[in-house]
Image (tube, grey):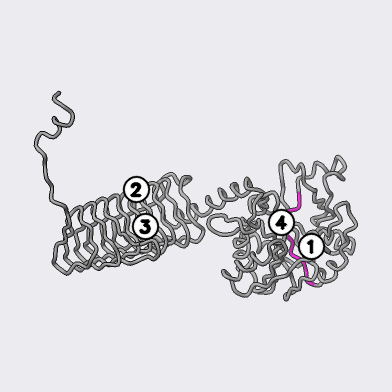
Amino acid sequence: MSISVVILAAGQGTRMKSSTPKVLHEISGKSMLFHAIDAAKDVSDDITVVLYHQAERIQKEIEEAYEDIRFHMQDAQKFPGTGGAMKGVEVRHSKALILNGDMPLVTTDSLHALMEGDADINMSVIELDDPSGYGRVVILDGNVHEIVEEKDCIPAQKEIKTVNAGVYCVKKELLDRYIPLLSNDNAQAEYYLTDIIKMAVEEGKTVHPVIVQEEEFKGVNSKLDLAHAEEIMQNRIRTKWMKAGVSMRLPETIYIDSRATFEGECMLENGVSIQGSSRIIASHIKTHSVIEDSHIENSDVGPIGRIRPQSRLVDTHIGNFVEVKKSTLAGVKAGHLAYIGDSSIDEGTNLGAGVITCNYDGKNKYRTVIGKNVFVGSDTQIVAPVTIEDDVLIAAGTTVNKDVAKGDMAISRTQMKTVKNFFYKFFGDK
């Protein structure tokens, strides 16, 4: 790969009104900065992220998720602004693509478009029906002539529809020469990256405008922007998987994490939420069910089922109001109102209504192991750690607090008694 990528992620993001760094706010299960990094990794093997605000926290999260990312710390006190962020950045290849960490919707195709050709600078440009509030990009003879801030526009320039989208592809030779020349002699006393466009034009260099889609290059600066970006990302994800063969009922009500995957013929009903790195294979996820970081194969879940992280379901039926956590179920039926935590349950086993695994003693979690062809009656409590072997029957209402051997039945109940005519004695004759 013959291009370097620099991602600017140093801003404080005060409009987010959050203690979380702006670029770490999540869209579809992934920090918006990570979406930008993913797009960058598709086009480059030399990626530098520029940091300043909460730099240690952001760098730590990046290093936990990626390898071979370089970092540059902006001296924002001495060199504020987007141009200041580039001071001291070194790139390895002959061109550098400069992205923003708060643009999570940018696609690889758009980055390739910005990399094409032999212009000295490719500059992303958006055409807006209403460009009010934006600086205008003046294009003459097919090349960028200047960027004019709105307050400086003459009436004819205010009619221009092209505005700067903030992403550039610059030849390394120009970048190395122009960045040290940037000045902060302006009203904000900041170093502006856009000044390299003016320098290039003055030198007679070619600055080529690349028309891009507003949707992809929208910056996320507030919680409202974050919500709009989430809607766009979710629409992309759902469209991708429906084209791949996943059926969805009322898709606009369904949430799918960007890390989730589907194989075979899957059905998602309305209100479903697929979170984390879940893998769904040939399964039916019914109305308002939640799958979190789990493997679901040849199974059905719900309606209103919850599969919590590190669960694996194969050939299994999970009914309404059943919760599974960190468990492996193979060929199991749990029709309704059950909690299955830290368990391994084998094929042919049926869990009745109200069955719970008591896996936590207030200090530690313990595992339950249930073998094949076990019938667990309704309202049974299984107190872990415990093993129930194959071909066992657990009577309804039983508390299982020790292992049960193969072929046995377990039952623990107090003897039922009746008091004749007690109703009339208590309430009196009617």
- Check disc 2: other Cα within 10 Å, few if <14, some if 14-19, many if 20+: many
Q: Which residue is mark 2?
A: 303
What is the secondary structure assignment of the residue under circle 2? Answer: loop
Q: Mark 4 Cα within 10 Å, few/some/many (few <14, many 20+)?
A: some
Per the image, label 4 sits on a secondary structure element best described as loop
Question: Where 277 falls versus 335 (above or below)?
Answer: below
Instruction: Give me the C-alpha separation between circle 3 and circle 4.
Output: 44 Å
Q: Nearer the viewer, mark 1 or mark 3?
A: 1
Task: From the image, tell me which residue sits under label 4.
Answer: 12
Q: Amino acid at mark 2?
A: Pro
Q: Choose between 44 and 112: the one closer to the eye.
A: 44
Going by the image, does 358 lie left or right of 6? left
Q: Which residue is mark 1?
A: 76
Q: CA distance from mark 1 to mark 2?
A: 52 Å
Can you tell which mark lies on residue 412? none
Q: Nearer the viewer, residue 328 or 398?
A: 398
Give the position of the N terminus as an image quadrant: bottom right
Q: Amino acid at mark 3?
A: Glu
Q: Which residues are magenta?
A: 163-172
Q: Is residue 167 magenta?
A: yes
Mark nearer the N terminus (3 vs 4): 4
Q: Residue furthest top?
A: 430
Say what amino acid the circle numbered 4 marks: Gln
